[in-house]
Image: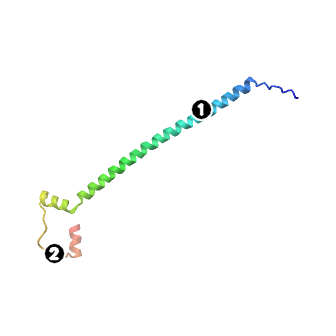
């Protein structure tokens, strides 16, 4: 049988191993915290995007409602007193020289 010698671990090597283990643990914990912060930011941005999409959809609906011909006609007739002309539009011809005089 062989004599098995126990190898002694030096204090320096033990401390070096402990510091390396602590550094690895701190690195992993830091990464977990950073990922959690990024996930929270991502969720906040997604919430903001969803709110913006909802507001845009509401504004698009409002634009479609206000640009409806019946709504415009109601506003033009009742509030502004406008009505359709019974006469056909007339064609106006102006000579170019007279137009230049008017412009100047």
Of the numbered discs 2 and 1, the one sitting upstream in the chain is 1
Say left or right for 47 vs 69.
Answer: right
**Residue topped by disc 2:** 90
Between 1 and 9, which is closer to the camera in this rendering? 1
| Horizontal side, residue 40 vs residue 61: left or right | right
Front: mark 2 or 1: 1
Q: Residue furthest right?
A: 1
Give residue 69's mark: none
Q: Quadrant of residue 68?
A: bottom left
Name the residue located 42 percent from the left edge and 44 percent from the top edge: 45
In the shown orientation, is residue 64 left or right of residue 35? left
**Based on the displayed image, in which of its 4 quarters is residue 74 positioned?**
bottom left
Residue 80, placed above or below residue 10 = below
Which sits in the foreground, 76 or 54? 54
Q: CA distance from mark 2 to mark 1?
A: 86 Å
Q: Which quadrant of the rendered structure holds the N terminus?
A: top right
Q: Tell me the tag on residue 26.
A: 1
Give above or below for 77 relative to 5: below
Residue located at (30% from left, 52% from top):
58
Q: Residue at x 24, y 60 (%)?
A: 67
Q: For the image shown, how many numbered marks are present on the structure?
A: 2
What kind of element bears circle 2?
loop
Residue 81: image location, x then y, percent: 11, 60
Question: Do tag 2 and tag 1 residues touch (Cβ < 8 Å)?
Answer: no
How would you rate the neighbour count of disc 2 (Cα within 10 Å): few for under 14, some for 14-19, many for 20 or more?
few
Position of residue 9 in the picture relative to residue 81 (left or right):
right
Residue 50 locus on image (x, y percent): 38, 48
Q: Report helix, strand or loop for mark 1.
A: helix
Q: Position of residue 78 (x, y in %)?
A: 12, 58
């Amino acid at each position: 049988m062989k004599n098995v010698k126990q190898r002694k671990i030096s204090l320096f090597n033990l401390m070096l191993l402990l510091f390396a283990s602590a550094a690895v643990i701190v690195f992993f914990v830091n990464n977990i915290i950073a990922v959690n912060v990024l996930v929270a930011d991502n969720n906040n941005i997604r919430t903001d995007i969803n709110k913006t999409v909802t507001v845009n959809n509401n504004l698009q609906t409002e634009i479609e409602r206000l640009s409806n011909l019946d709504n415009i006609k109601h506003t033009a007739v009742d509030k502004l007193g406008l009505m359709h002309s019974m006469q056909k539009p007339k064609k106006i011809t102006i000579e170019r020289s007279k137009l230049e005089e008017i412009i100047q």
